[in-house]
Amino acid sequence: MKRKTLALLAALTMLALFPLAGATFYTELVTKVMILAIFALSLDLLVGYTGLVSFGHAAYYGIGAYVLGLMAPKYEAANLWLTLPAAIVLAGLAALAVGTLVVRVKGIYFIMVTLAFAQMFYFVFHDTKFGRGSDGISMNFKPVAAIGDFTPFDLANAAHVYYFVFAAMLAVFVFLRLLLRSAFGRALQGIRSNEQRMRSLGFPVYRYKLASFAIAGALAGLAGYLSALQFGFINPELLSWHQSGNVLLMLILGGLGSLYGAVVGAFAFVALQELFSSVTTHWQLLLGGTIILLVIFLPGGLASVMNRFERTLIGESGDE
Amino acid sequence: MDFYSFAIQLLNGVQYGLLLFLVASGLTLIFGIMGIINLAHGSFYMLGAYMAFSLSSLTGSLLIAIVLGILLSVALGVFLEWALFSHLYKRDHLEQVLLTYGLILVFEELRSLIVGNDVHGVAIPDIFNWSIPLTATLSYPVYRLFMSAVCILLAVLLYLLIARTRLGMMIRAGASNREMVQSLGLNINLVYRLVFALGVALAAFAGMLAAPVSSVYPGMGTGVLIICFVIVVIGGIGSIWGALVAALLIGLADTFGKVLLPEAAGVIVYLLMAAILLWRPEGLFRRV
């Protein structure tokens, strides 16, 4: 446990000091990874803790991004404190609406239905004038963080964006940790391990799952908003099912149901992506092959290897 | 909309639905019998279409291309079941999703490496390359009627296979209790392998049949896959009959949606799914 705390502190310090050392390119890359980490954290609440395997999580990520794109005025900057809460709330509401339908079904059905609804949102933005079609939206100005006349930080500055995203990631992490330690979070984990029993104990399982789905959607919306903020460009591909597949992959790489795993997985995924795309333009071939081998030979994901490694290092035995 | 345009759209809708049925029936069989969610099923459709394009330009005949394509896709199905899917029977859905997602990436990149990213057309065979005139300006292509006829024939054969043959009996038994079938001395692994190969071949065949009408393009598998998920959800997992009804429903809804409400066309089938989920979460024809 002590070792874990130390490792965590070391990682946090490194992340906190990173922009001071690195070039802008790497600052921006790590910003992107941390945004993906928020996205993966939100999915961990669903897959890792509630036992709902969603293959359509990118929908809420995309909606968060589109809220910024559609709210931003053409010739001036949008206000961060107005658009950010709007993105979180609207993504959460979209997840709530979809959730009322999809949470009723289980297993394979749930996977298919979440994917189908995500595809529906994809078409909403892809096919309508409202969503500006397949070209997407490019924003001319970064949002400003002004409160009245006071502007605490500048979102056109890469280092400031980095720290803003870093703070958001920590906030999401702490929020989820607290949520999962609360009675609500315990109930979700109870539902994951035995839904029948929770129901017979009198828990309104449907409402718990729905709440989890909506919260996960809202947090994914936050991640999507931050991604739109960083790149200033939004298109329907943000909602595509590749995005949903990739975020699931991040979770598996890092390990489900630990929160740390989501963050580690985001870093591992981007590292793999950078590595493979430096080898060939057909890097998805290598990625796909890696996934297949990973599933066949390492049922527990990368996390199981790290656990084993840690165990041999510390000399513990047995499970967990 | 006058009578003839209505009739044309009706025929198109039915034809699209029947084509989707070929893909969805394999998907629902693989779900229902093997308990596997196969995201790569759309890739088999894409593969079929590309085989129709490559093999027909090699051999000069779509018919020969289709015969070769079916043989190749059965072989591919047997190989994939042996090499990959047989590892998945006891794994959870999440791992099945991941492996088949990886498979999609591999197929898409292989397609891009071997054939490239261009859109290709496939010629309609000469005997079917004419139209039945309906009015002075409207006519209906015979190839589309031929497609519908082939799909109906396959649906009937599939029904006979499952309801009337010894293999069908083993398939049905395997769907309801795997261990029992095994302990009765039947080779369930062989049954699974055949079911999987059948599913692959049906999807690939649908792709080959559709190639002359829809042309051949990257990403064509994904669209079909997601629509087929909607069909399976509406029809009920494991139900071939449900897949047929749902496929026709979706085919008609999509076709008429595109004509009557072009802005909302992409969304209509999903709204239909939402309505059915509210009404019957387990699908129209679920047999447990």
Image: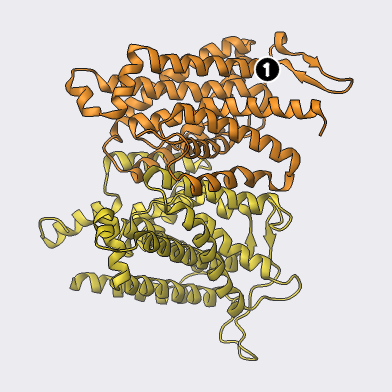
Chain colours: A yellow, B orange
> From what the image shows, is residue B210 above or below residue A302?
above
* Residue furthest to the right: B136
Secondary-structure class at tag 1: helix
Name the quadrant of the C terminus of chain B.
top left
Residue at horizontal 63 percent and vertical 28 percent from the top = B16
**Badge 1, how many Cα within 10 Å: few under 14, some, many 20+?**
some
In percent of width and height, residue B13 lies at: 66, 29
User: Which percent across, then down, holds residue A159?
Assistant: 52, 75
Report which quarter residue A81 is drawn in.
Answer: bottom right
Q: Is residue B175 above or below residue B233?
A: above
Residue A129 seen in the current view? yes
**Residue B79, located in which quarter of the rendered image?**
top left
Residue type at numbered disc 1: Leu
Viewed as shown, does residue B122 lie left or right of A220? right
Q: Nearer the viewer, residue A148 or A273?
A: A148
Query: What is the residue that sits farthest to the bottom in this orientation?
Result: A149
- Tell me what residue is drawn at x 68 percent, y 50 percent: A134
Residue B232 x %, y %: 48, 36
- Viewer-nearest residue: B250 or A232: B250
Residue B274 pos. (x, y %): 54, 48
**Relative height, residue A68 to residue A266 (above, below):** below
Count of numbered labels shown in the rendering: 1
Quarter of the image with the N terminus of chain B in it: top right
Residue B45 visible within the image: no
Pointer 1 chain: B
Q: Nearer the viewer, residue A202 or A38?
A: A202
Q: Which residue is mark 1?
A: B145
With B56 as the anchor, is A285 left or right in this view?
Answer: left
